[in-house]
Image (cartoon, rainbow, N blue to C red):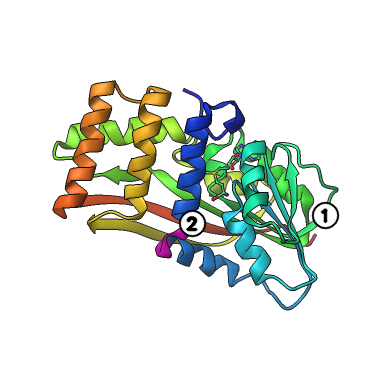
């Protein structure tokens, strides 16, 4: 089953709408916002930098970048989906952001264009993350920095009473929506191969126990994606969604995932 984020515009419009809604809803979650704020704080706002949000989707991070950066900074948002970019433009009608429709495998920018490049939950979806990291290196100026934020989807879990069923369902759900469940674990190797220096990394566990919020929106997204993408049988899918919603109502819900922020740079020499 192909990762639905690799060619979003080919999806059924209702599935695409569900993904747009999920991207914006998770962007409103306070703990998700705090992880974005932590890396934005590393990008200096006191000088006119040139910054790219690669795989910007509906612009959740691009809008934050535009608010954060110097008034004369250049802010670029690139994505492979026309539908996501249309939503991004609609949500930031007055902004100075320069949107671009393109694949991240061959970036449409000259060498050394950017001071910073941000990829926010993008590498986990790409067919060839290393090819994109090589493009990140090419388009960064010497000494330029990259922020690679992603979910370790291999660690994502939605609690179910039966452990074997929980492990199998977690894997089937996440494998259906992210091509590279373990990309964070591979990143130190990919960065070395792409010629980028790994400066440091930060891990954050985003867990919810009792009632869901961040993950409840994910469950509601999965309720639409499971039948549309054939992830589980109709009966399995219904049972899973009903269990999660009932657990939320009963205050017995649990879900968790580890997110990582990798800071890398293009060596000066
Ligand atoms: C999970 S979404 C994240 C969107 C956004 N960064 C956010 O966090 O809200 C993954 C994004 O990667 C984009 N994408 C997938 N393959 C791509 C490619 N080859 N080049 C550029 N963008 C791509 C998708 O269209 C989608 O917007």
* Magenta-drawn stretch contains 134: no
Task: State whether label 2 is within 8 Å of ligand 1.
Answer: yes
* Magenta-drawn stretch contains 28: yes
Element type at marker 1? Answer: loop
Residue 20 visible within the image? yes
Query: Which residue position holds label 1?
Result: 112
Residue 80 visible within the image? no
| Residue 117 x/y as whole percent | 68, 56
Viewer-proximal residue among 83 and 56: 83
Element type at marker 2? Answer: helix
| Residue 140 x/y as whole percent | 76, 55
Q: Which residues are magenta?
A: 27-31
Quarter for ligand 1? Answer: top right
Identify which residue is drawn at 44% across, 53% down.
26
Viewer-proximal residue among 156 and 243: 243
The C terminus lies in quadrant: bottom right
Q: Quadrant of residue 75?
A: bottom right
Nearer mark to the viewer, of 1 and 2: 2
| Residue 173 x/y as whole percent | 36, 33
Query: Which residue position holds label 2?
Result: 27
| Residue 97 x/y as whole percent | 73, 57
Viewer-proximal residue among 120 and 249: 249
Q: As displayed, is residue 173 above or below residue 249?
A: above
Viewer-proximal residue among 194 and 9: 9
Q: CA distance from mark 1 to mark 2?
A: 30 Å
Q: As displayed, is residue 67 above or below residue 79?
A: below
């Amino acid at each position: 089953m192909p990762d639905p984020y690799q060619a979003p515009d080919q999806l059924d419009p209702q599935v695409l709408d569900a993904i747009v809604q999920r991207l914006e809803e998770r962007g409103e979650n306070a703990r998700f916002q705090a992880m974005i704020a932590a890396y934005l704080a590393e990008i200096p706002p006191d000088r006119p930098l040139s910054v790219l949000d690669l795989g910007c989707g509906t612009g959740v991070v691009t809008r934050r970048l535009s608010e954060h950066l110097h008034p004369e900074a250049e802010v670029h948002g690139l994505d492979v989906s026309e539908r996501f970019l249309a939503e991004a433009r609609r949500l930031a009608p007055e902004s100075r952001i320069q949107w671009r429709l393109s694949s991240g495998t061959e970036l449409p920018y000259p060498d050394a264009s950017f001071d910073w490049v941000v990829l926010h939950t993008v590498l986990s979806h790409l067919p060839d993350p290393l090819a994109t990291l090589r493009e990140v290196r090419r388009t960064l100026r010497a000494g330029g920095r990259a922020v690679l934020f992603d979910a370790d989807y291999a660690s994502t879990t939605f609690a179910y009473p039966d452990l074997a069923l929980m492990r199998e369902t977690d894997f089937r759900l996440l494998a259906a929506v992210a091509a590279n469940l373990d990309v964070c674990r591979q990143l130190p190797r990919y960065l070395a191969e792409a010629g980028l220096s790994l400066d440091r990394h930060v891990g954050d566990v985003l867990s919810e126990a009792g009632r869901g919020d961040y993950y409840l929106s994910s469950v509601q997204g999965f309720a639409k994606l499971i039948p549309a993408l054939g992830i589980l049988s109709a009966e399995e899918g219904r049972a899973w969604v009903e269990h999660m919603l009932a657990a939320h109502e009963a205050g017995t819900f649990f879900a968790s995932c580890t997110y990582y922020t990798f800071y890398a740079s293009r060596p000066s020499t």
